[in-house]
Image (tube, rainbow, N blue to C red):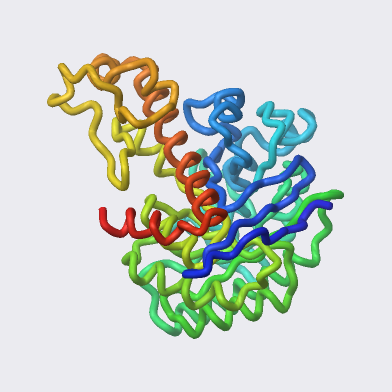
């Protein structure tokens, strides 16, 4: 049955969990990293390559897909899965974060936001009702409730006002119909105020969702503030439901969040840094396109089993970036996504074998 979350193993030294989430399109082993496919594609990757990497679920974005190509085209294609030829699970963000990033182009109203498209200035209205309707058309497997992403920094008064809006909109989101088999996640806000995070978690759980996300992080706050937000919210979320930390993050942040009981992650970092020539190794990155690699005929990471590292050298990949060849971006993107997906496999195995704390110390030491 879609929405069932099975808790398989708990770590004895932390809140880390090994779980299994079932959607209409199969089982997702958790903890899991979800590559970001904002505009119906994970940048530079084909669906077949993502499957080969072991991606279990990817993201799409309500706001961007609503604007282009538009719901008429998505509906005619038979939904987002058919449109982009991805047969595994998809989670769609509600569009709230993108709308609230349109500073100067939006106007708050009780039931949503009136905004001007960043593309051509066309005016639209997006709220809980509209977001749920769009996500029904997209027919994603996991639907996110519509919330307000509290900006950082925010005063206590601003955070309280924002949280009240989010709570109202999430109730409205919960009331909207979905397609058969779609499951819906609520989102915890509250900025950097631990008591507001706890209050938000309890309120969202009271509304009742299939899963729970911690949002409003990785928006400019420090890493300790981010972890404090997770610490304040996670213990108040149901043990028998998946927990999703939105937009996070670095490998160390992922490992530390797993230790706090988080099951699901997404971040643009692997693909965005790849486009700038940065490749992940250990808990750090190296600038593959830097001049010092011009005669380095070793792989990005000799310990890595990805296609790029099995077949190409840093010197060659640097050359591709230097002459503007697209293959360079593709190879580093492939490597970075392999790194993140393999990291989650290592985390799952370590929880199963009771060695998660060893892995955690490895990342803390770097």
* Residue 6 can be seen in this image: yes
Residue 143, x across and y down, in percent? 70, 53
Count of labels shown?
0
Question: Against 86, is 285 above or below?
Answer: below
Quarter of the image holding residue 128?
bottom right
View extreme (left): residue: 292
Q: Residue at x 64, y 33 (%)?
A: 69
Q: Residue at x 51, y 39 (%)?
A: 120
Please state which of residues 223 and 154 is positioned toward the viewer in this rendering.
223
Q: Left or right: where does residue 184 sit relative to residue 45?
A: right
Q: Left or right: where does residue 276 sit relative to residue 7?
A: left
Q: Left or right: where does residue 151 sit relative to residue 67?
A: left
Q: Residue at x 60, y 23 (%)?
A: 48
Please state which of residues 291 and 217 is positioned toward the viewer in this rendering.
291
Question: Against 210, is 68 above or below?
Answer: above
Residue 59, x across and y down, in percent? 59, 43
Quarter of the image holding residue 66?
top right
* Residue 127 can be seen in this image: no
Quarter of the image holding residue 255?
bottom left
Residue 224, x across and y down, in percent? 34, 70
Residue 230, x across and y down, in percent? 48, 70
Question: Against 142, is 301 above or below?
Answer: above
Q: Residue at x 39, y 22 (%)?
A: 308
Please state which of residues 72 and 42 is positioned toward the viewer in this rendering.
42
């Amino acid at each position: 049955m879609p929405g069932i979350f099975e808790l398989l193993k708990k770590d004895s030294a932390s809140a880390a969990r090994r779980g299994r989430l079932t959607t209409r399109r199969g089982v997702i082993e958790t903890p899991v990293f979800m590559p970001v496919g904002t505009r119906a594609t994970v940048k530079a990757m084909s669906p077949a390559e993502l499957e080969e990497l072991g991606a279990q679920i990817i993201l799409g974005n309500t706001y961007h897909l609503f604007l282009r190509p538009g719901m008429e085209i998505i509906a005619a294609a038979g939904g987002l899965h058919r449109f982009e030829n991805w047969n595994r699970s998809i989670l769609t963000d509600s569009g709230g974060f993108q709308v609230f990033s349109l500073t100067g182009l939006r106007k708050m109203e009780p039931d949503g936001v009136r905004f001007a498209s960043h593309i051509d200035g066309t005016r639209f209205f997006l709220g809980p009702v509209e977001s749920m309707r769009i996500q029904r058309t997209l027919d994603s497997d996991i639907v996110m409730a519509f919330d307000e992403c509290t900006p950082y920094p925010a005063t206590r008064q601003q955070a309280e006002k924002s949280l009240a809006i989010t709570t109202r909109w999430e109730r409205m989101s919960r009331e909207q119909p979905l397609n058969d088999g779609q499951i819906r996640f609520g989102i915890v806000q509250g900025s950097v105020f631990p008591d507001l995070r706890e209050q938000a978690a309890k309120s969202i759980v009271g509304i009742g969702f299939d899963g729970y996300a911690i949002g409003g992080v990785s928006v400019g706050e420090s890493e300790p503030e981010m972890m404090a937000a997770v610490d304040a919210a996670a213990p108040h979320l149901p043990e028998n439901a998946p927990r999703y930390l939105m937009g996070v993050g670095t490998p160390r942040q992922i490992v530390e969040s797993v230790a706090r009981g988080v099951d699901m992650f997404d971040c643009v970092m692997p693909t965005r840094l790849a486009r700038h020539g940065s490749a992940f190794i250990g808990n750090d990155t190296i600038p593959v396109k830097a001049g010092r690699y011009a005669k380095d005929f070793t792989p990005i990471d000799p310990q890595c089993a990805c296609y790029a590292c099995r077949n190409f050298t840093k010197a060659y990949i640097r050359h591709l970036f230097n002459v503007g060849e697209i293959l360079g971006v593709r190879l580093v993107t492939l490597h970075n996504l392999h790194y993140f997906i393999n990291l989650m496999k290592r985390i799952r195995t370590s929880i199963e074998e009771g060695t998660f704390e060893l892995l955690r110390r490895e990342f803390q030491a770097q």
